[in-house]
Every structure is written in structure tokens, then in C-alpha cells.
Amino acid sequence: MKLTYLGTAAAEGWPALFCNCEYCVRAKELGGKNIRTRSQALINDDLLIDFPADTYNHMLKSRLDLSKAKYCFVTHSHIDHFEPTDLIMRMESCFAHNMSEPTLHIYGNKAVISRYKHFVHDTDEEDIPPSVTVNEIKAYDVTAAGKYTVTALPAFHAPKETPFVYLITDGEKTILYLHDTGIPFDEVFEYLQKNAVKADLVSYDCTYVAIPSAGGHMGLDSVPAVRKRLEEIGVCNESTVHIVNHFSHNGMLLHDELSEAAGKLGFLTSYDGMEVEI
Ligand SMILES: [Zn+2]
Ligand SMILES: [Zn+2]
Ligand SMILES: [Zn+2]
């Protein structure tokens, strides 16, 4: 299974849209892996996680055939994870020709479905692409999506809705995708233990980077404890790949600095376009 990180910043992007802080100025000067767009990932070439406004940029940068994506699992309705307007570009008659897959199936919580319906309501009826379906899922739902089995687990994040982190398996390999969330709820660890989940890769929310973390996001100060707990309950072992991702400019470390700090703790550091084969 291949995981590609398409966007690795928190909501504001890094450099942030209107920001002139020291860390955004340095990111613009240095370029490369210091340029981080909003959160999105791709499994193989057919399962997307999230659909932010930067999706178009991700298609360009990684030269993707996004019409190969059959499934899109949305974590929550925050704009850095779900901005449905560009879904209109899946309209076959004029915007998209020779698509690889006829339909993109989107899954998300009630707030995600509501945002999509709001978009539909504000859009002319004939502009709604019939090649997109939206499907509401609830915490602990297990969804069969082709060869994948995707479990939605409740995230400690965005209390106005029920955000999800996802457990994704193709029957051989398993990814635990912890975005966005603070330290996961006890019930999530209990679910993983009870179901004897073995993760080959864990992707950790690290929004706070080097500053003290709190609430609905994690940082370098909290991810080691989560990893330790996952190891203690048998979800992870010595061959599990651990990656930190979803970074805010307020966290203060540019890519090389962050990569060094995270490496000392045993974590890889994501960057836009990073591919990991497990
Ligand atoms: Zn986010
Ligand atoms: Zn900034
Ligand atoms: Zn969020």
C-alpha cells in the first residue's frame, strides 16, 4: 500500500496565506519541503483522504490522474480538510473528459454532508455532477470501499461535530491516520486493542510542532506518549512506520529542523509530495 502526503500544513498553510511571521518568511525564502499546503493524502491512486481547496494544486504538483480516485474519506468539515466547490469540476459534459472512474464516492460525518448540501443548494442544479455521491457515516462504522475496509473512529477535535480519524486496511497492510486529533480518547485505544489491530503505519497530528500542545491537536511533546501506548497494547511493533504530519507555522521549526527533532524521537516528518510504501 502506498501513502502519498499531498498537503501537510495546518489550516492556514505554511507559509500562511496572509502571514509575515519569521517562520513563513523563512519558508518562502527556503522553498522546497518548507512549502506546505492544506491537508490531504492519497492511498495508492484510488482512495483520497480529505478534499481541501488545495486539491487542484496537489493534482498539478504530483501530476495525478485524480479521476482514478473512487473513494474520498473526509475527516471533518474544517475548511482545510473539506472544501466541496471544486467537485463541480467532475461534471463530465464540459469540465472532465475521459475520466478513469465514473464515480467518486465521498464519505463523511453529518457536518461534512451538510456542507456539501449547502454547496449544492447554492449551486445551479444542472451544475451538480452526477458522478459524485455523498454518504454519511458515523463513528465506528466500518465501510467496505473496493479492496479497502475503512473504520471511522471518533477524534478529539472540533466538538461541534463528530470528527473522525481513520483506520484503513487493504487486508494486508493497515494505516492508522490520526488527523485531526488531540491525544485520542481512551475508547479509541480500547477499540484498537479489543479488535487486535496491527498498524503498519501511523500518521500523527503534530500541529503544535515544538510548542506545548493542548486540546484538539498534538505536538512533538505528545506524540511519543501516544506511540508508547499504541505499542503497549500491541497496535504497533518495531516494524511500524511512525510519521508526524499537519504542521502550523506557530510551531516554529522549518522542515530540516523539524525532521531532526522528530527523528530523535523516532518519527519521520512528512512533506508535500512524500510517498511511503508499506
Ligand atoms: Zn486541520
Ligand atoms: Zn506565519
Ligand atoms: Zn480541524
Image: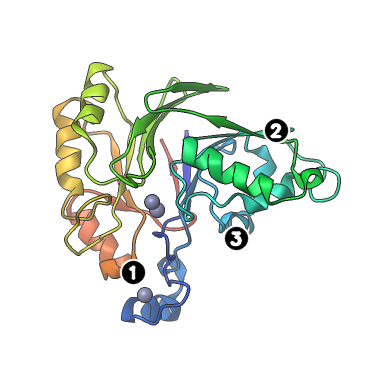
Q: Nearer the viewer, residue 161 or 236?
A: 161
Label 3 CB-ligand 1 distance < 8 A: no
Position of residue 256 relative to residue 200, above or below, is below
Residue type marked 3: Asn
Q: Which residue is mark 2?
A: 103
Q: Which residue is mark 1?
A: 249
Specify whether residue 253 is in view: no
Image side of residue 87 versus residue 183, left or right: right
Q: Residue 114: x, y in percent?
A: 54, 41
Spatial CA span between label 2 and label 1: 36 Å
Q: Which residue is mark 3?
A: 57
Viewer-nearest of discs 3 and 2: 2
Label 2 CB-ligand 1 distance < 8 A: no
Q: Secondary structure at mark 1?
A: helix
Most extreme residue toward the right is: 93
Q: Residue 135: x, y in percent?
A: 57, 30
Label 1 CB-ligand 2 distance < 8 A: yes
Q: Nearer the viewer, residue 111 or 260?
A: 111
Pointers 1 and 3 in contact (C-beta within 8 Å): no
* The C terminus - image quarter: top left
Image side of residue 105 versus residue 82, left or right: right
Spatial CA span between label 3 and label 2: 21 Å
